[in-house]
Amino acid sequence: MAESIYRALRDGALEGELAPALTIKDSVASPFALQVFSHVISQLFSSILAGKSQSRGLVVVSFSRSPSFYLDLLKNKGTDVASSNKQIQILDCYSDPLGWKDQLAGSRNFTALSNEALVSSNAIVFREVKHMDKLYNSIIELGKGLVGGGKIRFSIAIDSADEMLRHAPVSSVARLLSNLRSHDQISSIFWLLHSDLHEARVTAVLEYLSSIVASLEPSHQLANGQRGDLENFSLIKHNSKKGKFHVRFKKRNGRVRVMSEEVHIEQSGINFTSLPSEGAINQGLVPKVMVNPYKYMMAGDLWWIANMRDQLLQWKMCRQTRTAAVVRLFITVIQMMRCLILMRTQMMIWISDYACPIC
């Protein structure tokens, strides 16, 4: 199943379609997303070096790890980073994300500054992580610097969507990811997410933007309050070394395919094995979605729909401020009508395409 993920990212996007997007999410109960993310980077970059990928370059946007972490990762996998610097660039959002070190460097009272940014010519420091538009432009410029213009494509790896959500609203982050997916030169994109740091609706928005969602879960679920029970210490230790790896693929025809494997964390790296028969998912029981009515809706519309439930609850609870609650609900209903108009417009296009044989 892990090979299916690599194959999808390696094959990239078809002409006129969005680039494949992968969300790798975990939680504190099974914190192995970084290991999976690093494994995907090394596998994809190996395919790029071998010329077996649609992508001809890789841009790593590092928020939670220093550039040296990824350079050492590739070196440990046997990659000569010095000779392959024309195929990978790292946008360093880790060393000085808000530009504070740069400001202190200009002060007479501050002379010592970290040399992390100078670790390699592969890394370029980015100091304005709050501005998603500038981040988008920097990513595209780095990618074009690797592959040039035209139709040559490159891939993007973002090691922490959590850090972006710390500095920008979810609507801005969703717009950034959506714009990257729709760029003509993007072959594939994937990012890491710690789901228990966010509300369910935030995770749902990022999952919606993905064509592949990989989730890590503990092998053995512990009931509330059992974490401090000594009798369950063996289960906790067991979960610290392996877990369940569930992947949901959204196909082009609207169908959804779900697969599961077991992931093992070892000193030598990460390994994937098939689940026992009692833990495997029956593909015949997985519901198949034939048409996704929200496919052509914008990320902002999805955010308004996610807020619908909260707005209704606020209207129910705020009896003393009912007027303000009614106004908020009215605005939400208008946004819902906008979404329905977009859906209706797309349906009219579909009907006209099928009704007119000449077209």
Image (spheres, rainbow, N blue to C red):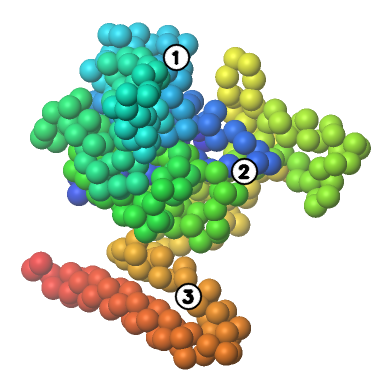
Q: Which residue is mark 3?
A: 308
Q: Which residue is mark 2?
A: 27
Which numbered disc flags the more N-terminal residue, 1 or 2? 2
Up-down relation of residue 68 to residue 125 (above or below) = above
**Residue 277: quadrant of the picture:** top right
Horizontal and vertical percent for residue 356?
13, 73
Query: Along the horizontal axis of the image, is 241 left or right of 169?
Result: right
Q: Which residue is mark 1?
A: 72
Secondary structure under tag 3 reads helix
Query: Along the horizontal axis of the image, is 354 left or right of 285?
Result: left
Spatial distance from mark 1 to mark 2, Cα to Cα? 26 Å
Which residue is more in the foreground, 105 or 179? Answer: 105
Which numbered disc flags the more N-terminal residue, 2 or 3? 2
Horizontal and vertical percent for residue 5?
44, 36
Q: At x 53% / y 74%, what residue is drawn?
A: 310
Horizontal and vertical percent for residue 37?
48, 31
